Image (spheres, rainbow, N blue to C red):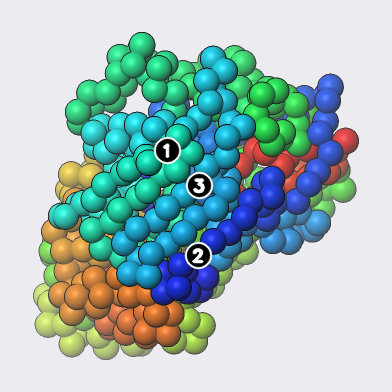
Amino acid sequence: MKTDVFANRAMALVSGFFLAATGVAGLPAVAVAEDDPLIVNMAQAPATLDPAWGCGIVEVGFVQNFYVRLTQYGSKPGPDGTTEIDVSKIEPYLATSWEISDDGLVYTYQLRDDVKFASGRPVTAEDVKYSWERVLTMNGCGAFVILDGFYDPPLIAALETPDPYTLVVKLSRPDPNLLQLHAQPWTSVVDRDVVEANGGIQANSLNEWMSANVTGPGPFILEEYLPNERAVLVANPDFPIQPASSKIIISFINSDPTLLLQARGGEADVTLGMTKASVASLSDNPDVRIIANDHAISEQIGLPNTKSPWDNVKVREAVSYAVPYEEILESAAFGYGTLFGGPFMPTLGEFTEGLIDIPTFDMDKAMSLMAESGVATPIDVDLNIPEGNTIEEQIATIIQATWRPLGINVNINKLSATDYIDSLQAHTAQTYIRLDGPGVPEAGYFLGYDMTCGLQFNLTEVCLEDAQMLLEEARGTIDDAKRQALYDEIARIWSANTPKIHVYSDKHTTVLSSRVTDYHFNYEMDFRLWAKN
């Protein structure tokens, strides 16, 4: 669930919007590789194949390739001849066009009539309605996305299907983010006949069959799947827009040395999830290309604001000056990141360059603020990190040393993946380090869970009532300038309270073999435009 409010969306809400589809709009055309499969190595395997139930980017990013949605992101040039997602553009996909009422409360989508399920049955507006209602009934992470975090009242007031290829979405409030929501994997259209034949829909519960199977329709068919080991994707011959590769073989490999060895030896065409140290070791290798893309993810030090000593704003501010940001960026992330100030990652459209100062390492300032806090030292602090994460272990070790002169003794707890996530979700972690960001790259969505008082997903337990009131206003504001002014004021309030520390905005790194001719970066792993010669 977690990972630009678009100018054209704001205009659309005021005047009504109509956009015609022309194939995979906004995405460049590439030649289809017929025989030689694309070999992809990934460090992490999906935990579920159900787009309604997945929470992590790995799950929904992988599974989105087997389904279609109403809209999709556009494309723009990326590094070294590649392309990348353009979150400022929303293009047609299953929908051919849409109209938005002047008050922003009614979206009317017209759908393609040439997309079919494996059975040959055409995809209709009823299938979209069923798929979304399924997500809402199951009430997992997908429900939060579809509702954009608005539960009371629910953002979606009604879904209507006046004819087979028209879907009318009625809202309880204006939401300039809606078109982007409908590009998200959680809104994927599933085959209701297959779902009903295999467990149907149970309220507040997963569907076991869907956890290990896909129903389509989408650009790929899942030909073979061995959980945590291997997946084989083949192009869906009946999908109207063919992907660039006719076959993709994916191996899930959680050994970083193995990923590095196979990337270096040319056994993998695309490698995802290698540590930054391993990626950096390939920088002089002429047989590979390293593609580094900015995305809305950052390394964060969580300071749960209700827990001592973080319930004292001066202590939070003090430790923020006792982080050697540039050293960490170079030594832990090998330069694959960007320093920034404020609550928003620089890739989010609401980020204003220069509004908030980039944080600096200043021990004199840190010591002064610690003295102003009035908190008695020494203080013992437990810091949770996931076991095996070398970057976060290195960050933890560095701040353990730099916080000690403040009288803060850091005890590093390396937890298993399960125990680490449990400590965050149960809000038992006193302090933690996490690579995190919004699943929908938009500041309102991000702060909608990350800064909402009392919300379970608000891991830092920050409650800034003035900022929350402004956020509520901003999320329903359709005027660009007014909305941006509100987000700027939110950023000032947030920064004055230092609820957490953004160490740096991460760059997503992908290693490509020399055989790869086409690569399109999407933080949700869109395989449609990956190809090799």
Q: Which mark is residue 500?
A: none
Count residues near mark 1 (Cα–Cα under 10 Å), then give few for <14, some for 14-19, many for 20+.
Answer: few
Of callouts 2 and 1, the N-terminal one: 2
437 w.r.t. 203: above or below? below
Q: Is residue 430 visible?
A: no
Q: Amino acid at mark 1?
A: Asp
Q: Determine the residue positioned at 30% across, 18% down.
A: 200
| Residue in front for this viewpoint, 192 or 144 | 192
Residue at the disc numbered 3? 110
Marked residue nearer the N-terminal end (3 or 2): 2
Q: Position of residue 211 (x, y in %)?
A: 39, 22
Real-space Cα distance between discs 2 and 1?
Answer: 20 Å
Q: Which residue is mark 2?
A: 17
Determine the secondary structure under disc 2. Answer: loop
**Residue at 30 percent of width and 53 percent of height:** 170
Q: Position of residue 320 (x, y in %)?
A: 34, 75
Q: Position of residue 285 (x, y in %)?
A: 83, 47
Q: Tell me how far mark 3 sits from mark 2, CA to CA.
A: 12 Å
